[in-house]
Amino acid sequence: MTDPRAVTQRNDEELDLGAILGTLVDNKWLIFAITGLFLACSLAYALLATPIYQADAMVQVEQKVPELPGISALSQTLGASNSQANTEIALITSRAVIGKAVDDLKLDINVSARHFPMIGTGIARRFANANPGVLAAPWLGFNRYDWGGSKLDLQRIEVPDDLLGKVMTLVAGENGGYTLLNPEGDELLQGAVGQIATGHGVTLQVGSLKANPGTRFDVRRERALTTINQLQQAIQATEKGKDSGIIGLSYQNASPKLAVALLDRVSEWYVRQNVEWNAAEAANSLKFVQEQLPKVRQDLDRAQAALNAFQIQAKSVDITMQTKALLDQSVAVEANIQQLRMQQADVARRFTPQHPAYRALMQQIGQLEQQKGDMEKQVGALPDTQQELLKLTRDVDVSNQTYTGLLNQAQQLDIARAGKVGNVHIVDNAQVDVTSPVKPKKAMVVFGGTFVGAFLAFGLVFVRQMLNRGVEEPSVIEQLGLPVYASVPVSPTEHEIALSDRARSDGRHHLLAISSPADLATEALRSLRTSLHFARMEAKNNILMISGSSPEAGKTFVSANLAAVMAQAGQRVLVIDGDMRKGTLHKVMGGRPNNGLSELISGQIDMETAIRPIASLENLHYIARGKIPPNPSELLMNQRFAEVMDQLMPRYDLVLIDTPPILAVTDASIIGHMAGTCLLVVRFGLNQAREIALARQRFAQNGVEIKGAIFNAVERRSSGYYSYGYYEYKNGT
């Protein structure tokens, strides 16, 4: 016996492009239906989805003006960038800035009108755009929904902590009245527009209400921190170019006005905060400078007095050219050291000694001290009088430069403290293009939805093909060792007959072989009749058993119509419904199931009562299943059944028995012992190769030989299946 797994493996290996294309063509209507459904849904979404608009703004961050002399040199030493955008991006999206915008715009209060599910939002938006300021009438009496034009403005709402973040319902009433309900639908308060209403710990003031009576609004008071966190994620801040100092802001929202207002508020509060911080920083630095001025003034006075005293004592000694050059160099170095020393005192107030700014400052002071030491050696080579004069003159010049620098710096810091200008400026105010929403991208949505639908449709078809390993080629059955006597094509006419049979019980037969003799399936059964003529020559009797491996294979259809075409050929044929559990032969032949095989075997009726004729075919008779017995298998094993078959065989040329599936019950194997010829019905695309092999093995274990198979309900496949083709042949007109 051929292993069905090997057959399946060979079939998989032989899968080619033609088979794949054929599978797609065979399932084209399913693919078109799924793709069309996704296309329709994509179009509906693109047309009805709420558009999202993006507002954009731009700010510029300039380098801060040095607060103390020497800060520029320090910045260069630290390798600082001219752009402070990285820090400013964090500041612009900070809670301090966004929180102010939330308070100004009351963004922690969410109000939205309820719309009819799925389509209501699109309908309301289109009406409002086409009819500004007009309130739409409710559709079909659904006044609880907004159909366009409804508005609710809340001036104030305060709720207890247990209602924060929860959706409450405001129901519009008559003449500006309203009712507020909690999430469970219980009334919290009633009020009117413009008045403050309180109840159950809730305080509410409605500024304006425009809605049909009964319209419902969803009202929610969020926690301020929750709203701020959401906006921090929603507002995008990015630097436009490396170290450019230009920061771009963007925010997306369904309301273009709200998007613009939010970015404007954020930009304004950011600039205002920057000005305040710069003023506060300038005030602190000014205080430090003012504290240093008296000390430097005292040093300058002492240096001038010492120089004057020396000159009087030395009787107006002049500085030589060599001493003048050393004096200029020494003054420059000493002035820088004095400036850095003052800056060290200021930096020490803000940073620890381990901070990079502090360490860089000390490194710069050390370099200048080294230069000063080198110049001191040169000064030591001068005459004593010139050395003393140089020292005193240097002290005066250094103190004078330091004092002058501090005075200038104090004036600058005083101006910065009192000024209203920071180092941040708004370049572009927030703007939004209302003609081009960023979402949804209609063309992309439609194309993407259609593509996804087609992809899923193809995937579904291939998954079904992979999971459905039903036999689709007669060669697979033959490889199992069963010759295929005939391939019966699927018949649309038979499908219509089956539907009409389910719809009514008119007592008439519904045989395809009689109602549609030119049908392809009928032609295939005639071919089967010819094949059986030769197959039954060596049979032990004229009993033909037709069985299947599982239900829905079409055994009853094949049995009844095969009997009909044999009767049309002049043979006397008797069809017996051997399925006493779920037999349906009586529906095809016309009649009721009672007074059939079960009553005949049990002796409740005689043979003449059990055998029923077919009006349009005098050579065709049938026996229905009878009443369903409690023990069908034991009834078939009764000696009475063998006696009945012995009496029927001489009276007919062929006794055809339709049996239940072998893998479901053992009735078929019992009947098979009495039959001279046994055939197995295999349904196209339903019965698997392993299932067919198991059915044959089950019969063999019970001593029943299956002569061959009937391939039933074969469908035409674009991939090249439908191996046994039939062509309808009609008389010419």
Image (tube, rainbow, N blue to C red):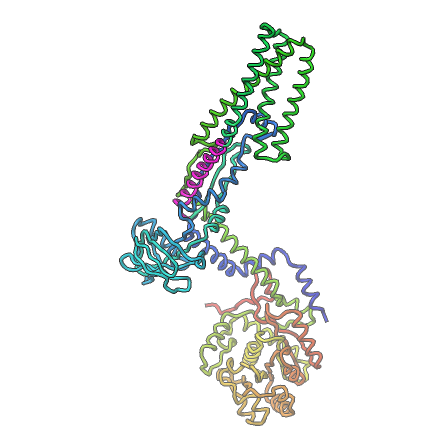
Question: What's the residue at 69%, 80% (across, down)?
Answer: 704
In this picture, is 31 found above or below 635? above
Question: What's the residue at 52%, 83% (across, down)?
Answer: 586
Specify the quadrant of the image occupied by residue 678.
bottom right
Residue 330 point in image, percent of width and height: 62, 16
- Report if residue 114 is visible in the image: no
Residue occupying the far right of the picture: 1
Q: Quadrant of the C terminus?
A: bottom left
Tell whether 189 sits left or right of 666.
left
- Report if residue 418 is visible in the image: yes
Q: Which residues are magenta?
A: 254-283
Magenta span: chief secondary structure: helix
* Front residue (pair 579, 561): 579
Residue occupying the far left of the picture: 175
In this picture, is 698 found above or below 143? below
Residue 588 point in image, percent of width and height: 51, 80
In this picture, is 247 found above or below 564? above
Q: Quadrant of the N terminus?
A: bottom right
* Front residue (pair 731, 696): 696
Residue 605 point in image, percent of width and height: 55, 93
Residue 632 highlighted magenta (yes or no): no
* Front residue (pair 224, 404): 404
In this picture, is 321 found above or below 78? above
Specify the quadrant of the image occupied by residue 656.
bottom right
Residue 39 point in image, percent of width and height: 47, 55
Question: What's the residue at 60%, 80% (across, down)?
Answer: 660
Q: How many marks?
A: 0
